[in-house]
Image: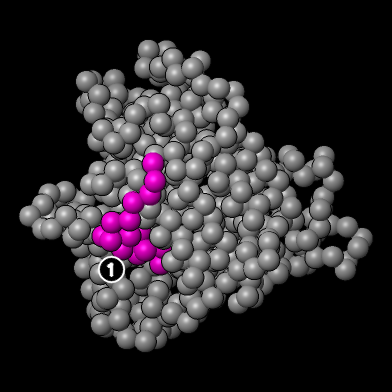
Amino acid sequence: MSSPKNESTALDTPDNSVHPVDQIPPAAQLWPLSFQHVLAMYAGAVAVPLVLGGAMIDAGRMQPSDLPYLITADLLVAGIATILQCVGFLRLGARLPIVQGCTFTAVPPMIVIGVNYGPAAIYGSVLACGLFMFLMAPVFARILWMFPPLVTGSVITCVGLSLIPVAATNISGGYADDAGSVANIALGLFTLLVVLVVERFAPVAVARTSVLIGLAVGTVVAAFMGKVDLSGVGEERWVGVATPFHFGFPEFPVSAVIALVLVGLVTLVEATGDFLAAGEIVGKKATPRQIADGLRADGFSTMLGGVFNTFPYTAFAQNIGLLAMSRVRSRYVVAGAGAILVVLGLLPKLGAVIAAVPTPVLGGATAALFGMIAASGIKTLTKLEMNQNSVLVIAVSLTMGLLPVMHPTLFEQFPNWFGTVFNSGITTGAFTAILLNLLFFGTGRTPANAGVELDDAELAGIDANVYKTGTERS
């Protein structure tokens, strides 16, 4: 395979002094390509506020009218974060074509924090997480050895597995009066089937939007079943701006902050791998300074998320795959996608439409999404040369991560702060994986990596070969 530097694209110009990453294509080319990036990430972007907001509504911590706000605020901040990452400002932004979105890693601990303390504590913890990421960015490379693929693969697998019960609850209908009905479960499984059919038979470009298509088709079918309530759409404004501290002034319970700081560590590792993979694909290898600037931008965007009551932000891997597939390397194309997200974030009526997606449809679509997250972690682990110690680290990390998921009252008799930190399978699994890796392998030069040639991206837990080809289909 030729390197990205030698590949021609429709956006190459005769001016070879300007790297393709830094070229600005004509508007007629730029905006359609930007919209393609929005389609690739949109389902993942709106799934997080839908899942978190739904859990908070079920717990009585939010009102249904809050859900459209969560969606539009998330799109707005994701757009700003994407523009900042691509265009850069001072020492913020990797200046690579990277789409930013909210990370699913934060969802389980945020739900635990919200149930125990309320939304103000969620967003205080997000602010603290962002500040931690911002301050850690310049020195993170020095402790990257603490997060080999053994750790990141275990944690990512745990993220996916921990979220599957959320999908199961949603497929059944959540906590509605008809929860568990045959109609709800059939609707959820039908939505999952649509996602699978699109993934299997559609062209690669269309398959990248399989979850979005599943949500759309499932909602249409649900409308014929009388399960779509659009009453809130008419009440929303056409245009509106997210307001800072919508859910009140942030609170900072120590246990909640610790839980999201652990999420921040995992996010820094994932983002580092994304920067390395993106740099390899576009033929402009990410330098240590670029990585630090990119991580700093992630931290800043996460703090912005805390202000506007959204989520921690990181690079969206599916859009890095789209870079390889389309071979369009301009960071301004991706910045254009950020601009589109900002516009979408100013349309509360759109947020209300998305909020009307029935719970079983959301469950069916996210079941596939969460399963893919778990499979991504497993793929990372399969690249390792296993020995008894590495198998033990994986086994115990997954077990500890799933204990509070399988038995939610496990830490009921413990102090409240302890439950807030460890009732999330993500924080429990991450904490266990990091400690066991240090216990068995110390400095990070682990026998688990022996005999396996991994490039920089893979050392950060990223499967760069998938990104190079853009697809695993034959």
Q: Seen in the image, is 420 located left or right of residue 252?
A: left
- Give residue 113's position: percent from left, percent from top: 28, 49
- Give residue 303's position: percent from left, percent from top: 49, 55
Give the residues in magenta: 248-265
- Give residue 457's position: percent from left, percent from top: 54, 70
Instruction: Let me know if residue 235 is in the magenta part.
Output: no
**Closer to the camera in the image, 440 or 45:** 45
Q: Residue at x 36, y 72 (%)?
A: 150
Q: Residue at x 72, y 49 (%)?
A: 333
Q: Residue at x 29, y 20 (%)?
A: 183
**Closer to the camera in the image, 391 or 416:** 416
Quadrant in the rendering for residue 5? bottom right
Is 187 above or below relative to 451?
above
Is 320 above or below relative to 42?
below
Confirm whether residue 391 shows in the render: no
Confirm whether residue 71 shows in the render: yes
Inspect the image, locate mark 1, and give the three-letter code of the amino acid beneath it: Phe
Q: Residue at x 70, y 57 (%)?
A: 87
**Closer to the camera in the image, 159 or 431:** 431
Instruction: Let me know if residue 252 is in the magenta part.
Output: yes
Residue position marked by numbered label 1 in the rendering: 431
